[in-house]
Image (cartoon, rainbow, N blue to C red):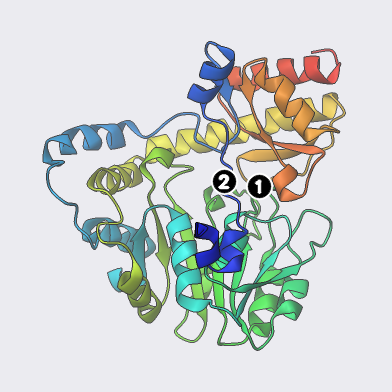
C-alpha cells in the first residue's frame, strides 16, 4: 500500500500539527472539572464586544447567502481607520491565513525564510509546508528578537523575514531604533512580515508601529488580528496591510469566501466599540501588574511582557501544567517552543488571575 507521506514533500511529511491551548470542553470531558479557568491561549477574557454580538445575531437569517468574497465593507472600514486606500488591505481568516499564503507565494525549494528562535510556531510550519528552507537567528538574551542577527542571516535566497512584535510566546518587543537599523539592512527582494497581533497592548513609547514605514519601495506587510483585543478568536478574522501589488497577489491565491459573513459584520461592529476596547486595555493592564507582582512574591522568574501573557519559569513546565490542569486551571506548556522550564500564562479576569495565583502557589509549594 502506498503511504500518503511518500507522495508529499519530505518537509511536509515531517511536520507535526500546530498544538493549540487545551479547550475547556476537553478538560471537562477528561477530568470532570466544573468551571475551569482557561489562561492558555492569550484570549480576551471579557469576550467579544456587545456590538459584535448584536451584529452577529442580526446577520444570522442571511446565512443561506455566501459572504462578500472580497470582504469589501470590512476592508473599507480598516482602510478608513488607518487612513489608507482599500487596495492596501487584505481581509483574512485570521492572520495565520496570511502567513500561510505568504509562504505559498514566496517560498519554494531552494528559497528560505528567516525568523528568530523561540518565535511563533506557524513561521516554521508555513515555511516547511511551502518546501522552503529555514534560517533561524539566535535571540539576543534567550527571549528577544536580535534584529541585527536576523539581518545577518539573510542571503540571496531569502524571500521572507518573519518578525513577531510583540513576540509570542515571550511577550518581548524590539524597539524603534533596532527596527530602523534593520530596515536599512534588508535587501529589496525580501518580504518583511511584521506580525503585530498584540500591538494594541504595548505601553512602551518607543514601540515601532510598522505601518508608519510602509512605502512603495520596501516589501513590508503588517499583520493584525481581531482575535485578541476585539475578542473574536472564534470568528477567525484578521487582516494585512501592504503595497497594492502584494495585496493583489494575496487575493489571487486566497480561498473563495475566506472570511465568513458573521466574521465580517462582527469585526466591523467591534471596531466601533471604543468602550469595549478601552475596558479590555484596562483589564489587561491591571492584570499584568497584578500577576507581575505575584510572580515576584512567589519568586518565580518571568519575562517582562508587552502583550497579554507572561512566560514564567516554573522549573518543569510540563509537570506544572499537568498539576494545574487537575486543579481546573489551563495554562500552556512551552516545550514545543524550546522552553521546557516554562509555562505561558494569559491574563484573565481579576477572579481568574487570583485563582491562578492560588493554584500556582499550591503547586509550587508556596504560601498563597
Residue drawn at the location 73% of the way across and 15% of the way down = 358
Callouts 2 and 1 close, C-beta under 8 Å? yes
Q: Locate residue 228 relative to residue 308 in the image: left or right.
A: left
The kind of secondary structure element at disc 1 is loop
- Image: 112 above or below 229: below
Mark 2 or mark 1: whose residue is earlier in sequence? 2
Q: Position of residue 92 (x, y in %)?
A: 37, 58
Return the mark for residue 31. none
The kind of secondary structure element at disc 2 is helix
Q: Nearer the viewer, residue 297 or 356?
A: 356
Return the mark for residue 306. 1
Return the mark for residue 201. 2
- Image: 207 above or below 152: above
Asked whether the viewer can see residue 84, the reply is no
Residue drawn at the location 57% of the way across and 56% of the way down = 122
Q: Which quadrant would residue 241 be assigned to in this image?
A: bottom left
Q: Position of residue 105 (x, y in %)?
A: 45, 75
Q: Which quadrant would residue 187 be assigned to in this image?
A: bottom right
Residue drawn at the location 34% of the way across and 70% of the way down = 253
Amino acid at each position: 500500500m502506498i503511504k500518503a507521506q511518500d507522495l508529499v514533500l519530505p518537509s511536509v511529511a515531517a511536520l507535526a500539527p500546530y498544538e493549540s491551548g487545551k479547550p475547556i470542553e476537553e478538560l471537562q470531558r477528561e477530568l470532570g472539572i466544573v468551571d475551569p479557568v482557561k489562561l492558555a491561549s492569550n484570549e480576551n477574557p471579557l469576550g467579544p464586544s456587545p456590538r459584535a454580538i448584536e451584529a452577529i445575531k442580526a446577520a444570522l437569517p442571511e446565512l443561506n447567502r455566501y459572504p462578500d468574497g472580497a470582504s469589501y465593507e470590512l476592508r473599507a472600514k480598516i482602510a478608513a481607520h488607518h487612513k489608507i486606500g482599500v487596495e492596501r488591505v487584505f481581509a483574512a481568516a485570521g492572520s495565520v491565513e496570511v502567513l500561510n499564503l505568504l509562504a505559498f507565494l514566496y517560498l519554494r525549494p531552494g528559497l528560505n525564510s528567516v525568523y528568530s528562535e523561540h518565535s511563533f510556531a506557524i513561521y516554521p510550519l508555513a515555511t516547511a509546508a511551502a518546501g522552503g528552507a529555514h534560517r533561524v537567528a539566535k535571540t539576543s538574551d534567550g527571549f528577544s528578537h536580535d534584529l541585527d542577527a536576523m539581518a545577518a542571516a539573510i542571503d540571496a535566497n531569502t524571500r521572507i523575514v518573519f518578525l513577531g512584535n510583540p513576540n509570542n510566546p515571550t511577550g518581548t518587543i524590539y524597539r524603534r531604533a533596532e527596527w530602523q537599523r534593520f530596515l536599512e539592512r534588508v535587501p529589496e527582494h525580501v518580504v518583511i512580515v511584521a506580525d503585530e497581533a498584540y500591538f494594541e497592548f504595548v505601553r512602551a513609547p518607543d514601540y515601532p508601529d510598522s505601518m508608519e514605514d510602509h512605502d512603495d519601495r520596501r516589501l513590508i506587510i503588517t499583520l493584525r488580528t481581531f482575535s485578541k483585543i476585539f475578542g473574536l478568536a472564534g470568528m477567525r478574522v484578521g487582516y494585512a496591510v501592504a503595497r497594492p501589488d502584494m495585496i493583489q497577489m494575496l487575493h489571487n491565491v486566497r480561498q473563495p469566501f475566506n472570511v465568513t459573513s458573521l466574521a465580517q459584520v462582527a469585526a466591523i461592529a467591534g471596531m466601533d466599540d471604543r468602550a469595549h476596547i478601552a475596558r479590555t486595555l484596562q483589564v489587561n493592564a491591571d492584570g499584568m501588574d497584578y500577576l507581575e507582582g505575584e510572580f515576584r512574591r512567589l519568586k518565580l522568574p518571568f519575562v517582562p511582557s508587552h502583550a497579554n501573557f507572561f512566560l514564567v519559569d516554573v522549573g518543569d513546565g510540563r509537570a506544572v501544567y499537568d498539576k494545574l490542569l487537575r486543579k481546573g486551571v489551563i495554562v500552556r506548556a512551552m516545550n514545543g517552543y524550546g522552553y521546557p522550564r516554562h509555562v505561558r500564562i494569559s491574563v484573565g479576569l481579576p477572579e481568574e488571575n487570583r485563582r491562578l495565583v492560588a493554584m500556582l502557589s499550591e503547586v509550587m509549594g508556596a504560601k498563597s
